[in-house]
Amino acid sequence: MIKEVFKIYDFQKPKGGNPLSKLLVGGLIEAEGDRLLKHRKILNPAFNIEKLKVTPRTNCRVHNGDIGDPEALSVSAFTILNTCSSDYHNSSASAVISTLPGFSGKLPFKLETGYIGIGEEENVQLFYYFVESERNPKDDPLLVWQAGGPGCSDFGALFTQFGPLQFNTTFVEPTLTLNPYSWTQVANILFFDNSPGAGFSYARNQNAYRNSDTLSAAQTYEFLRKWLKEHPKFVSNPLYIAGISYTGIVLPVIVQNIYNGNELGNEPIINIKGYILNNPLTDRSIDFNSRIPYAHQFALLSNELFKAAEINCHGDYINENPSTRCVDNLQEIDKCLESIFQMQILEPICLEDTTALYKDGSSSEKNRTNAIRSLKYINTACRENGYSYFALWANEKSVREALHIHKGTIGTWELCNSDHYVIGKDDTATYTYDVSSSLPYHKNLTKKSCRALVMSGDHDMVFPYIGTRKWIRSLNLTVGRPWTPWFVGKQVAGYTETYMNEDYSLTFATVKGAGHSAPEYKPEECLAMVDRWFGSYAL
């Protein structure tokens, strides 16, 4: 499939990148919402932060030097003014769901779905799934999960990672079963489709589809304030913002917005305690340049080839290099890596063309009988193929009725708004990438009373753990607990280290054998990890 992706997206000497570094730079292949995204863009890590920013259309006025600017991290520079009306235009609608198609009997947990309108005219309607903790909803943490992409649905996290339900892939018809390692055993979880055009979220006009890193962060802050106003009994719960992959760019901005809003007195005051990141993109230069050293470390590249590339490319494998030797080395590296499943390097790569079902759901909508028949021939040992159940289920009329989806708001369900990336461009008609690195936000958060958990599946080559450790060390924190194994069931589950700075603490943990979405690959270990961390215990 990766070879087919290269053919489709035509890797021709991209601007700002080595012409042959297609696997490592162009067409970033990344897992989001538990699918393999083929971003139609050549990502230039040397992003110009001065590029045009989209003006957010929210209840709050946003001015020059907005919250997305790394220069504007302090409250004094926090220019979303506290002029938001306390009386929001409330067009939200929520419903408690007791049964779902494909699940036998009543749901043994409380599931609520609904919409939150964003902006002065609420032209953006963000759809959410809320699952109450099965332990102690009153006191357990409130975890707000954000998928990456950018612009993906939380559907994958809900049904394949750590939500209470999962698809049973042993049946042809999509059926649901309980997840024994759901994080809802220890936390209330708010999943939401964070961008119109992804999942069940939508926009009321074309202009409302425009988005950016900073606008997405502002919309999430607005979404959260409105949701808490409608669910006041959860205002006092300890709140954590969490996410995966590209969310590593946006999430620290969201957390910063919350702290700034609290200090400005915005209502409701959010009981923010910290954040969780899973294999995040944090700094384009650090994270993308870590792929080749990671591949060498895991014996996917020879010592000779790696050393040659390191010398000839000067350790920079993503920016344009006039050296012919560097280009030749990267070409050889591509040959070694192009057939590796980047999300989990030990798993098979999908070679069959059986992924159309989850890409856009068109197969299930046009001819459901043929779609179900095609599931009989899917090799679910190839993980990506298992995602074919997503669209088949989500496009069912009975499913939409059960979830109380607004009729006529979307056509075919899509996991991700995949047109965000356009090859050869940094920005598109619908998205502006105006945060090149979230490191300045992490650095500012180290001055807050804040806890951070950063987990890395150690077999992920999308955003390898060695890059994550590098940017963590750049924060210049004090080492609390040095590198040591952590255990589940008396077995090594990974390795961990802790850092601190006054009231700030950061726990980094690898998950042994896990891929990009760590809870999907190692559910028992990840549940144990977050449960211990929420309780302030050592892993």
Image: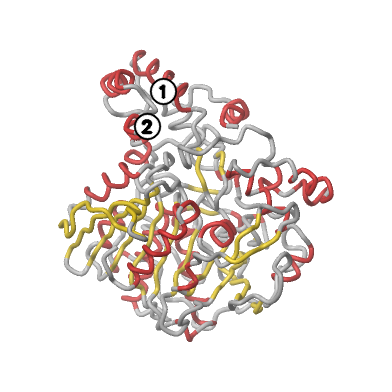
**Circles 2, 1 touching at the beta carbon (< 8 Å):** yes
- Above or below, 526 against 531 in this view is above
Q: Is residue 478 left or right of residue 403?
A: left
Q: Position of residue 309 (x, y in %)?
A: 32, 21
For the point 26% across and 24% down, the residue is: 314
Q: Position of residue 465 (x, y in %)?
A: 34, 45
Q: Position of residue 334 (x, y in %)?
A: 45, 24
- Above or below, 129 against 310 in this view is below
- Which residue matches tag 1? 333
| Residue toward you, 150 or 382 | 382
Q: Residues within 10 Å of mark 2 (few under 14, many from 20)?
A: some
Residue type, label 1? Ile
**Quarter-wise, where is residue 411 in the image?**
bottom right
For the point 34% across and 35% down, the residue is: 294
Q: Residues within 10 Å of mark 1 (few under 14, many from 20)?
A: many
C-alpha gap between disc 2 and disc 1: 9 Å
